[in-house]
Image (cartoon, grey):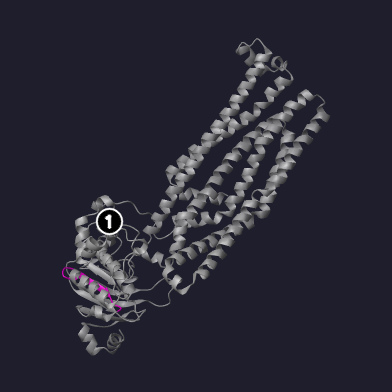
Amino acid sequence: MSGAVYKLSHILTKREKMHAGIILVAILGMAFAQALGVASIMPFISLVMEPDMVFENRYLNWVYDTFNFTSVNHFTIFTGVVMVVILVSANAVNALATYLKLRFAWMNNHRLSRRLLGKYLSMPFAYFLNQNSSDLSKNVLQEINHLTKSYMIPLMMIITKGAVALFILLTLFLVDFAVSLVALVVFGGAYAVIFLRINRSLVYRGAERMKANKMRYKAVTEAFGGIKEIKVLSREPYFLERYSKASLKQARHQAWNAVIGKVPHFALEAVAFGGIVVFVLILLVTREDARQVIPLASLFAFAGLRLMPALKELFHNFTKMQFNRAVLDRIYEDVTSGEVAGEVQPVKQENLPEPLPLRQEIRLENVSYFYPNAKEEVIKDINLAIEKNTMVAFVGPTGAGKTTLVDIILGLLPPQKGRLLVDDVTIDESNLRNWQRNIGYVPQYIYLSDDKVARNIALGVPDNEIDMAMVEKAARTANIHDFIAHDLPDGYDTFVGERGIRLSGGQRQRIGIARALYHDPQVLVFDEATSALDGSTEEMILGAMENAAKSKTLIVIAHRLTTVKTCDVVYMLDKGEVVASGTYDELLGTNEQFKAMARSR
């Protein structure tokens, strides 16, 4: 339990901890009000049973004289009204405390999910090479929500009900220590024994639930992500079965947790109310005078009505927290660990760092790189220079290191040996954002959101900061403006559908080029941008590339060698090394491996 509190304290901000302190004060006030409500029942019943008590009890007598009562009957009515006011006030305080608790929990849910997403977005690109996007999405969208509902709110309920139980027990101990001690040992001990017996199973099943939930998300994400191929191949049953197995496993663990948290209550509730009857009988035998028995029995019965639900909630929420401990462990690990401790902060376009200008060349000096857990280097001691306003290509067989090399130039992967320089400036963490501000990137598969064309071109720019003149200029350079303006129903305001499903491959690719050109970078990187296109569409893309090449430095990863015919320099890579370089014609005439690639493609 102490470990859980420690982890929660580390994922909450100072302000959130201060709010939690205020809520704790409200909870203690509510618990005291509840105990006061319980305590008020005994004097009222005593007065009803024995009116002359007002003159025998010095406290009641002081109230009677201070407020100038002249009738015991009136005083008894006054006492009843006070008791009702105390009970109503206690419930009002309870309602306020409940509101504050739930508001704190759900506002914290919003802040924590935002913080976790910000943490993921701030992580280096290499972090995502070993992560599953559906798992990260699940953590942000569901597990944070699960943490709130099944850990933070139960923790608050434990504090609340624990405080209520403590104040009520203190009241009972002050009235009759022996009976209160027996009740505490019997009922508190019973819950404690049951909890200790099932604790290990709770933790295990909770971890298994989280694994099953991860598989549910993965199955759904992959099913919808590849829906076209799945429909063509009639593979729907396979993905449905994958989801079903994980979903069934999660449902069984959830059901077990829900049942185990409630079953003990039914048995102990019967014991509790049976115990009250036994307690009354014992009092009648030992004290004989019913006038002494009934007020005390009423107090314990009323206390039982308040105490048993509190004990039930304590047990239920303890089991819920233990069952969901794996969620806290994962969120704590993701929020507090990693290479970057901060999170993404909102930045307006005018406050973005200044682009690092390219005046002469991009240079790689003795650059090497290997992926985590890899046995060999992917890039091995590469030295090369890319002059400004030239078109350079990287070609080679699959696994040659082309994409890794370009990722280093993009600043996504820091060299583990050697360095990347722009002119004579070494690119490191201090100027990485400046360098990336001067790069446009066109991947093989263009990501398009289910949004307007203009928003997809100016990806990530708020509506009020989108420069439509720059959007149209980029679209013209990418040979897509005429299609957008004349063929789409709403022009740049047309929604493209999820992943651009309403557009052809070539149209998506040209929107990707327009996106790369939107902020007018000096350097454009094409990562196999034509490999999935037919011949005529490839010509359109090549035309767009030639338009862009008139005033920019182009770096191309080529699958089809037709793409590199007009390049100034072609670097041929194999097993992480540059094995040849030259123009297309030079390599075609001197390099047998390049010649074989040209024939096969």
Residue 226 seen anywhere in this rendered image of the structure: no
Q: Position of residue 3 (x, y in %)?
A: 55, 51
Label 1 element class: helix
**198 to the left or right of 458:** right
**Residue 225 is inside the magenta segment:** no
The vertical placement of 211 against 555, above or below, is above
In this view, the residue in front, 322 or 444, is 444
Residue under label 1: 493
Quadrant of image for the C terminus: bottom left
| Figure quadrant of residue 380 | bottom left
**449 to the left or right of 591:** right
**208 to the left or right of 302:** left
The residue sitting at 26% across, 50% down in the picture is 464
Q: Position of residue 75 (x, y in %)?
A: 65, 15
Residue 38 seen anywhere in this rendered image of the structure: yes
Q: Position of residue 527 (x, y in %)?
A: 30, 72
The residue sitting at 58% across, 28% down in the picture is 88
Q: Position of residue 270 (x, y in %)?
A: 73, 42
**419 to the left or right of 297:** left
In this view, the residue in front, 79 or 425, is 79
The vertical placement of 360 against 376, above or below, is above
In this view, the residue in front, 273 or 128, is 273
What amino acid type should be assigned to the residue bearing mark 1? Answer: Asp
**Residue 557 is inside the magenta segment:** yes
| Figure quadrant of residue 428 | bottom left
**Total numbered circles:** 1
Mark 1 Cα-neighbour bin, 10 Å: few <14, some 14–19, many ≥20: some
The vertical placement of 596 against 9, above or below, is below
Give the residues in magenta.
549-559
